[in-house]
Image (cartoon, rainbow, N blue to C red):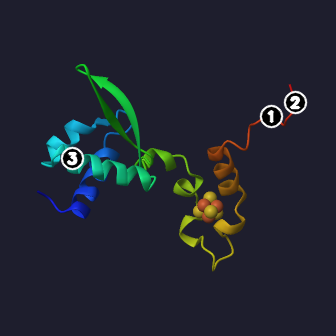
Amino acid sequence: MPKRNDLEHKALSHIANTGGDGILQSDLWRQLGASSREGSRVALKLENKGLIRREKELCEGRWTYRLYPKRKPASINSIADCPCLTCAENLRCGSWGATSPNDCEKLTEWILQQSGIVGMSPQGDS
Ligand code: SF4
């Protein structure tokens, strides 16, 4: 039987890689070679740490849990249109230089767009 911390780490890694589909608790423990009792303890611990979410699911006539990651792995797509990637100032840009991310309008605008702040209509505006 794997050590508990090792099992937690492996379980979290497996769950994180399922993305939005999640994984049935019983399938996960089977894949990791753990008992369902040990697996249930680890799932509760991960949930209490706020790392996963458990949702009750009826599977083949029995109630079980499907485990979902709370955080999804970062994707390269999330920065694909960042202005820094194609900026002519890229090599000279830094907190030490004349151009800096600290006061770059292009970068600030992009970050605000990503967060949904830019493009939202003001409250009461219809
Ligand atoms: S922070 Fe602004 S100036 Fe610097 S590389 Fe990014 S887009 Fe270019």
Looking at the image, residue 22 lies above or below residue 7: above
Position in image of residue 26 (x %, y %): 21, 37
Residue flagged by tag 3: what amino acid is it?
Arg
- Looking at the image, tell me whether mark 1 or mark 3 is earlier in sequence order: 3
**In 3D space, how far apart are the residues under numbered discs 2 and 3 (Cα atoms)?**
55 Å
Q: Is residue 121 left or right of residue 80?
A: right
Q: Residue at x 29, y 51 (%)?
A: 41
Q: Split into 4 quadrants, where in the image is the N terminus?
A: bottom left
Q: Residue at x 28, y 57 (%)?
A: 8
Residue flagged by tag 2: what amino acid is it?
Asp
Q: Which residue matches tag 3? A: 37
Q: Which residue matches tag 1? A: 121
User: Is the distance from the Cβ of mark 3 to the nearest ligand 1 atom less than 8 Å?
Assistant: no
Q: Which residue matches tag 2? A: 125
Between marks 1 and 3 in the image, the one whose residue lies nearer the viewer: 3
Looking at the image, residue 93 lies above or below residue 107: below
Position in image of residue 61 (x %, y %): 25, 19
